[in-house]
Structure formats: structure tokens, C-alpha cells
Image (spheres, rainbow, N blue to C red):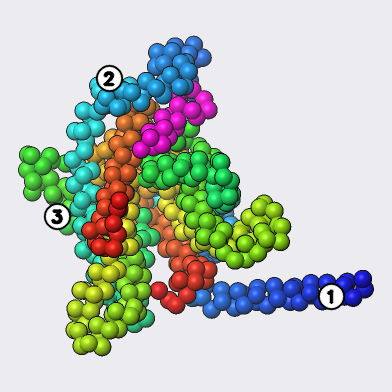
Amino acid sequence: MLKHTQKDSVSTRSESTDTRRRRGRLVKRILRNKSIIFGGGLFLVFVLLAILGPVLSQQDPMDVSVRDRLMGPARTHLLGTDQMGRDILSRILYGIGLSLLVGTTVVALASSIGIMLGLIGAYAERIGPVIMRLVDGLMAFPGLILALALVAVLGSRLENIIAALTFVYTPRVARVVHAITLELKTREFVYAARAIGVSSFSVMMKHIFPNALGPAVVQSSFMFASAILSEASLSFLGVGLPPGTPSLGVMLSEGRMYLLNAPWIVIFPGATLFVMSLGLNIVGDGVRDLLDPRYRSGT
Amino acid sequence: MAIVALVVFLVTNLIPGSPAAVILGEDATPEEVQALTHLMGFDRPVWVRLWDWVSDVLRGDMGNSIYTGKAVMPILLTRLEPTLILTVGTVMVAILIGIPLGIVAAVNFRKAADLAAVSLSLVGVSVPYFWLGLNMILVFSYVLRWFPVCGYTRLVESIPEAMTYLFLPILTMGIHHSGGIARMTRASMLEVLRADHIRTARSKGVSEYAVVFKHALRTAILPIASTIGIVIILTVGGSPVIETVFALPGIGRLTIESVLRRDFPMIQGCILLIAASVAMVNLLVDLAYASLDPRIVYH
């Protein structure tokens, strides 16, 4: 009995040392990955800008000043003012926060639901195929069109935009996880786990889920930039956030009327959106290089 | 397609809340909402409405627009031309930029040309195309005065004039989507360029031009064809945005106009048409596989 306990504690200790070593190797690989460092750095700058927005710009993003309307970049208004005399810098800082909020929430919700649906789709014999056919049906719609239809029915509010985009992106994660789960189900370690009597649920959660997480994370990292651009597109079209809201898409939509006389109203919010999306896509490339073995050789 | 039609119906019929309330707005009284609900038949059981709608659609009748009172189908057909030309043009520009860029990157793997090509493609993927479109208008229409700001002339009236209106939208979408094609071309070519048959061809003294274009590109074309299919879908999906920027009277613009007017029959018609064209593109891409790779045979 004593021998068994000693053996168990030794194996637990070696397992935890193994986990620590693996984590250490992963951290080293992350730190060596230039895309993650550069893109992540860019992303971090935007997070800091969103958090420190009120400190960096003393102006209220909603403050209307008719006297200062369409003013070019100057010392009082570093990035100029819009058609209502509102400070563009403070509106951009607020807009970055909104974009990050939408992106984070959509990615978190779509990834969680998508992973769950993908796993169930591959494991549940009866409802699995039904779920996956629905997923295929939803994938037949271009994302923006489906989001447009949903927002049209639900109404233009932040929570509805998040719900619509979550609905659009969930099938993409589900399909990736479903494909990888089907492949993992035929692997030897899964057969071995089943042979020693591990239940299907445990196999799914303890053996398949951790292995399917990598591709899901890669998918999610690209989804972040896409969700931010989709929210901006909806707002640009006038079906996203209500007019006047300091969102980057709304700013572009309202500013395009003044493109010739005051191009800064359009140039600065659009450039912000572009750099934010660029940073996230670079991170996505880095995460893919890190987690997908096919890309480790640099292809 | 049956699942697609079902989703289109469900999106506009099973969402919590009454579509009549959405059409009438927040100021409508319950009596007004009830009257419109009855008038539009939303008080009938869902399965009855589904059956009526599906049987009407199969006969080519998508109902009448709530806004104009006219039949949906003829309106959809009149709006098809700009979207169709925009999509074909975008794919051509994206291929013309994307494939050479991807080949240059793959042939010069980890050299300066590769870095430049990868960076350019990343910029293309990340740039919000509505912002790029607005910048195009600013430079080419307002400053240089080379192209009209917005509008459209039908092809039957004047082909050159129609193309002056379509040039900037096509260029905008083409630049944006060329990034995806370039990235896929690079990845696919890199994989093929390391294959045994390429090494054999080189050892036999085949010229580098023939190795790249006759041996490698032909083998690498399948994933590229798949990406071209995705570009077509994304262009159709992005048509509401780009057609709004350039005021093109296409299907995308009609979708967004219908969404803003809460014209549900028209929204259903637009989405069904777009989803059907997406399904058609997917089918054509699958068929293209067989002609591009003789090993693929469909039974």
C-alpha cells in the first residue's frame, strides 16, 4: 500500500514537472515568434489606448461645438473635429474600446459555442448530423449578409450586433472543431482510452478537447479582426450602432459626406481600424505558425 | 439549398418579437401592431407560413415589396447587372494581382521579395475595403478627377461609361481580395516546390520558368481555385458595403435599402438570391476541381 502511494506521488511529481517543462517550451516559442510579439505589441497599444482614452484626451467624445466644426488637425484638437465640432481623437479612443468590446465578446461566445457544437456534432450519433447540416446551411450565407438580416430583425443595438455576429461566426469554429474531432476519434490514444473503459464524455473532454483547442484558437485569432471589421461595416451601413455613437464605423459613415472638405474625418478612424486589423491578423499568423504543425516550417 | 431557404425563412419569422412592431417602430400602438400583424399574415401558424412561402418561391414568386408594392423578383433581376460585373471584375483583378504576388513570394522564400510580397498581401487582407474605397474616391475622383464620384450607367446604354463607374469599386475590392489569393498561392506553391517531382524536373535540367509555371503552379492550383471561390462569395457578401460607398444600384445596395426600410419580403428575396448564388459558386468550384485535377472523378 505504502509502495503504491509512493509510486503515485512520484508519477504525479514527474507529470507536473513535465507540464511545467512543456509550458516553458511554449512560452519560449511564443517569445521567439516575431509575428506574435509584433502583432501582439500593436494590439496591446490599442488596448492601452482604449483604457487610457479619458486620460489621453480631455475632450468629451459626445461634446458638440458648432463653432469648431470641420476644424483640421490643430493643437486644441490633435486629429481635428467632425461636422458637429466633436473632437475626433477622443471619439477614436472611445471607438477603439467599442471595437475591442465587440471583438472580444464575439470571439469568446462564438468560440465557446462553436467548440461545443463541433464536439457534439462529431460525437452525438443522432443530433450530431442535424447540428452539422444546420452549420453547413449557415455557412452558405456570406457573414455580413446574415448579420445584416439578423440586425434588421433584432434592431440596431450593441447587444444585438454582438448576438448577430456570434451567430455568424459560431458555425466557422464548429466546422473546424468537428473536422479535427472526426480525425482525432480514429487516433490510437483515443482507442486506448476507450479500451480501458473511459466514458465517451471523458474521452471528449479530456483527450479530444485539448487537442482540438489549437485549431480553434487559430480560427478565433483571425475571427477577432473579422468581427471588428464586420461591426464597423454594419455601423457604416447605418444598421449597426445608432448615429452619433463614437464607433469607428459610424464615424466613417457620417464623415464620408465631408470627404472633399474635411478628409481627416474619414482618414483617421479608417486608419485606426486598418492598423488594429493588421495587428490582429499578424497575431493570427503567429498563432497559426505556433499551433499548426503544417506552418512551422515557415510556409 | 433547402436548409438555406429554411434559414432565410426562420431568420425573418422566428426571431422573438413581432416583425410588424419592427416595421412600425417604437412609437406604434399595440392596436396598430396587431392590425399590421394580421394584414401581413404573421398571426398564422409558422408551418402554414413556411409552406406558403416555399411553394410561392418554387413558382418564382417571392411576394411583393412592402415599400413599393411591386413584385420582388423583377426588381431583383433589374439590380443584378452591377453586382455581377463587380464580382467578375473583382475576381479578375484579385487573380491578376494575387497569383503573381504569391509566386514571387514562394520562389524567393525568406528573401526580401518574399517579405515585401507577404507584407503587401497582409495589408490587402487587413484594409477595411469601405475605407479604401473612400480613399480611392478622394484621390481619383476628387483630386485627380479621373473617374466619376458615384453613380451607374447600364451596359446596354454605354459600355465604356459603365466601366468608368465600375473601375474604382472593382479595383478596391480586387486589391482587398488579392491578399487572400496571394497568401494561398504562396503557401500552396511552397509545399509543391519541395515535392519530389519538382526536384526531378530540376535535376533533368528543366528551366526554372517551366518548373514554376508548368510543373509547380499546375499542381498548386487546387487550393488557389478554392480561394478564388471564397473570393467570389466574399465579394457578393461585401456588395452592400462597396455598392453603398460608390452608390451602385446592385443587389447589395437593394439589400441594405430593404433592411433600412424593414421591407421583409425584399430582404428575404435578396438573401435567398445571394445564398443561392453562393451555393452555385461552391458547386462550380467542386466541378472545377475535376477539370483541374484528373485524379478527381465525381460519380
Q: Nearer the viewer, mark 2 or mark 3?
A: 2
Quick check: can you spot residue A246?
no
Label 1 amino acid? Lys
Q: Label 3: how many residues lie within 10 Å, few (<14), some (14-19) or many (20+)?
A: few
Quadrant of the frame with the C terminus of chain A: bottom left
Identify whether B196 is placed above or below A232. below
Pointer 2 indicates a residue of which chain?
B
Along the line of sight, the residue nearer the viewer: A85 or A53: A53
Residue A7 disc label: 1
Say yes or no: labels 2 and 1 on the same chain.
no
Give the camera-side residue of B204 and A13: B204
Q: Nearer the viewer, mark 2 or mark 1?
A: 1
Residue under pointer 2: B69
Between label 1 and label 3, give the one nearer the viewer: 1
Secondary-structure class at tag 1: helix
Residue at the image point whose x is 29% and y is 48% from the top: B283
- Which residue range is magenta in the image? B1-23
